[in-house]
Amino acid sequence: MFPKERRKEILEIVNATGFATVDDLSKRFGVSVDSIRKDLKVLQLEGKIKREYGGALRLEPESAAAPDPAPSPTLESILADDEAKADAGRRAVAARAWLEINDGDAIFLGVSRTNAYLADLIAAGDKRLIVTTNMIDVLQRLAGNPKITALATGGYLNVLNNGFTGPACISLLEPLLFSKAFLGTCGVDLGTSAVLATTTDDGKVDDQVLKNASYRFLLADHEKFSIHSGYRWASISDFTAVITDSTDSNVLRAIAATGTPALC
């Protein structure tokens, strides 16, 4: 489903129910909460809904008629600003993850935009590595470095994240061993130490990787700690370390309480 079509359905849901939460919409459409938040921003800028904490309200007639007291920033500027902030966090996490990779490692890079940035660093480096991945973007970025031996898992292609998943993907992974694995997440619930995936298939693939890796790194930028919905496929304690750009003392204490160190 294209974003424009999804926003049309979101508007219908909000108008029919009066209120819809980000978490519920994320589950209904099978996309990340970040995607839903962007959809709601678009609908708000178009004057079709009113955003509230955690979701969106139906816009009542009097609200729709009320003039905006101040000029609103453009949709493009808001989305670009949000994306720039998110990318800064992902790049910081990728840079820290790069320090954990040594010449001769056999590593796994999971489906993650942070791993796409980590692949850029690997491609620009001079370390001789074997890199297995189920993410097409990672493969494309590694293609130009002759020191990198890249292996694609294959499997069912999830067009939403450009990554392979499903039973065929898991079957290929089963006999492979990795010195280090770098896995992303759609969110981390610090209250339960749950590491979340958008779909059960994605979670099952990452779970197989966890079993096969000697060192397991969770890549989680600061935004991931505000997301609490999804499929729980692991706990923080299942990882060797959490690599994050978060400087929130509460977040870092919660991670440390699981016995897993945070690398910043």
Image (cartoon, rainbow, N blue to C red):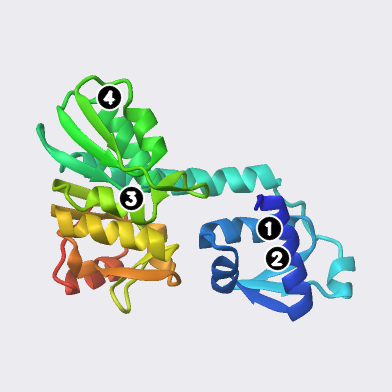
Give the spatial CA distance, label 2 vs label 3. 33 Å
How far across and how far down the image is residue 5, in percent?
A: 72, 54
State the image quarter where residue 250 is shown: bottom left
Q: Is residue 13 above or below residue 165?
A: below
- Say whether residue 58 is visible: no
Q: Rate crowding at label 2 as few (under 14), some (14 to 19) or many (20 or more) other CA atoms within 10 Å.
A: many
Q: Residue at x 66, y 42 (%)?
A: 76
Which callout, 1 or 4, points at the residue further toward the start of the chain?
Answer: 1
Residue designated by label 4: 124
Q: Is residue 217 above or below residue 132?
A: below
- Residue type at the position of mark 2: Ile
- Residue type at the position of mark 4: Ala
Q: Rate crowding at label 3 as few (under 14), some (14 to 19) or many (20 or more) other CA atoms within 10 Å.
A: many
Left or right: where 60 falls relative to 101: right
- Residue type at the position of mark 1: Arg
Give the spatial CA distance, label 1 vs label 4. 38 Å
Left or right: where 216 falls relative to 231: left
Residue designated by label 3: 169
Nearer to us: label 2 or label 3:
3
Task: Tell me if label 2 and label 3 are in contact, CB under 8 Å.
Answer: no
Residue designated by label 1: 6
Q: Rate crowding at label 4 as few (under 14), some (14 to 19) or many (20 or more) other CA atoms within 10 Å.
A: few
Which callout, 1 or 3, points at the residue further toward the start of the chain?
Answer: 1
Give the spatial CA distance, label 1 vs label 2. 6 Å
Q: Residue at x 13, y 70 (%)?
A: 259
How far across and how far down the image is residue 238, in percent?
A: 19, 66
Of 119 and 248, nearer the camera is 119
